[in-house]
Amino acid sequence: MTTVVAGPSARGPRATAGERIGWTLAVAAPLAFLGVFFAWPVLTLLARGLAPDGTLDLGGFGEVLSRPRTWRIIGQTLIQATAATVICVALGIPGALVLYRRRFPGQGLLRGVVTVPFVLPSVVVGTAFHALVTTGGPLGGLHLDGTRTAVIAALVFFNYGYVVRNVGTMWCRLDPRAVEAARTLGASAWRAWRTVTLPSLLPAVASAAATVFLLCATAYGVVLVLGGTGAGTIETEIYQLTARYLDLRAAAVLSVVQLVVIAAALWVGERARRARQAHLALRTDVPATPLRAADAPALAVTALTICGLLVMPMAVLVIRSLRRAGHWTLANYADLSTTGGDNALLVSVWEAAGNSLRVAVAATVIALAVGVAVCLVLSRNPRSRLLRRGIALFDAVFMLPLGVSAVTVGFGFLITLAPTGLTRSWWILPLAQAVVAVPLVVRTLLPGMRAIDPRQREVAATLGAGPGRVLAGVDGPHLLRAGGLAAGFALATSLGEFGATSFLARPQGPTLPVVVYRLVGSPGAQNQGMGLAAGVVLAVGAAALMLACERLQTSAALSRPAPPHRDRTGNTLRPAQMMPAHNPGESA
């Protein structure tokens, strides 16, 4: 496959003053957002632990890192996160093929099923998996309760859909002519996939794998419910030290260790991406093809994964939401509109759901605005080596929110922003959730943006297209194609976010995950049943929103033609005038 990279010898139109100002804002505005709403709270909390008297005291590192428990926790975190990531990638690539490159009845429904786990509150997932593996459950005979295997299965349950959707979105945009050329030249279907398709997908796979590793390494609720002390992670240890023992010194040390782990994961992911990065012939109108006999292995793996790993725990969740005190009933759903009495709610579940939706929409708008600006910067390949290193650092910085404990972020918000009065404002929740959603938006949009051949932008600018028209005509269709998916992930992340929100939500304005946690953690059959029913409502609503985003962006991308490029005299340029002819054999 031919890789075209704009290097030091590349020549293009010089940037105007307006363009330089625009790119400066695209860098400065996201950095300001991250600095105020992430770096400031996190560094403040770390300072409270490492410099309680205003003087830096690093003695805590030696003390905490000399404990055998600390290294056991670090080892468990790395083993569980690595195993879950490998399984997610191994299962996710066949799933991306079946759900995004093939066409069959019920495909949209299956995409929704794959999405649901990503947005479920971790405490609900932990409860559902516990019901599966505990004595008397469908898998009770396997004695998996409290084991690392159960934790890894739950982590795969959470993140399988993220790999499928990110890899699938890239896969369904690859120009099929390269594979067709390889087959014409005598390559088998397996060899064409291995030598043409897989190298094109590796940047998206590496990006998704790095994100999944971070999500697994920082998992909290599901690990606490399923693994107890036998499968604890750095995240659960930070919570224990902070919330139970108020040991900010040890918590700060572990937060720094967690940042080191995250930085190492980012470095490995970036090296893997750069080793395979290529500028691809992407299209927004690649039609899906019917299932074929050669797809039988991928179809079997996907069917087993969806039925065995995804549907079974969700089925347990639905079944338990329809039972109370050993009897089948709809009372759990009927009680969702009630407050007080025997339940533990100050507001009804439907009020909390409305509040969650409003917060999620606001957080999504913020995350998309910041994320698109970040992706436009990261997708460029400047001639200067210093600028390229700066862009790599810029990329790593915006992944850090995924790797920092939600407890650290939530407490940091309370400490730093309380004097400003922002913690009493409704906007505190959208801002906190947007911090978590921005990295997912960036990782969703970036693979496609980086795969655009820079010659397209250079030719368009040389032929007279202004910066705005270049962005609209070259970058715009690809942003639109993946924008719905990014918006869906941002909505899903905000709807299901519990860590930081649990510290910041006001009692009179809780979100749905906070209400679910409050109900499931309260005694009484009514509270337990209502919590499970509310979890089902959250799952169905999030899946519906994600599917709606995907359908809207797909129909918009297919129905809206790219704006025509014009030369300096105003004449419309045909595609053949814009770019050199594509040679499928060259890509193959």
Image (spheres, rainbow, N blue to C red):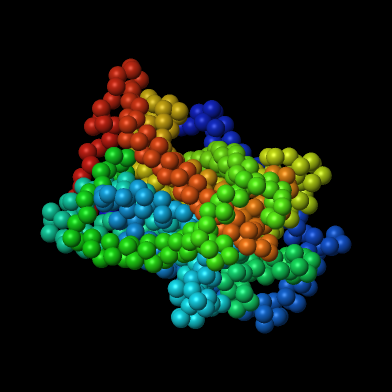
What percent of the width, then of the height, locates residue 152?
A: 49, 71
Instruction: Work out whether residue 341 can be spotted.
Output: yes
Q: Residue at 53% of width from left, 45% of height from top? A: 491
What percent of the width, then of the height, locates residue 276?
A: 37, 58
Q: Who is closer to the viewer here, 49 or 456?
A: 49
Viewport quadrant of the N terminus: bottom left
Q: Residue at 64% of width from left, 66% of height from top? A: 235
Instruction: Work out whether residue 391 can be spotted.
Output: no
Q: Which residue is most to the right?
A: 53
Q: Residue at 29% of width from left, 32% of height from top? A: 578
> Eyeballing the image, is 312 above or below 136?
above
Asked whether, in this view, residue 467 is left or right of residue 494, the answer is left
Q: Who is closer to the viewer here, 12 or 67?
A: 67
What percent of the width, then of the height, locates residue 232?
A: 61, 73
Where residue 455 sits, quadrant-wise, is top left
Asked whether, in this view, residue 560 is left or right of residue 549, the answer is left
> Eyeballing the image, is 233 above or below 425?
below
Q: Who is closer to the viewer here, 23 or 162?
A: 162
What percent of the width, then of the height, locates residue 419?
A: 82, 44
Q: Residue at 33% of width from left, 17% of height from top? A: 569
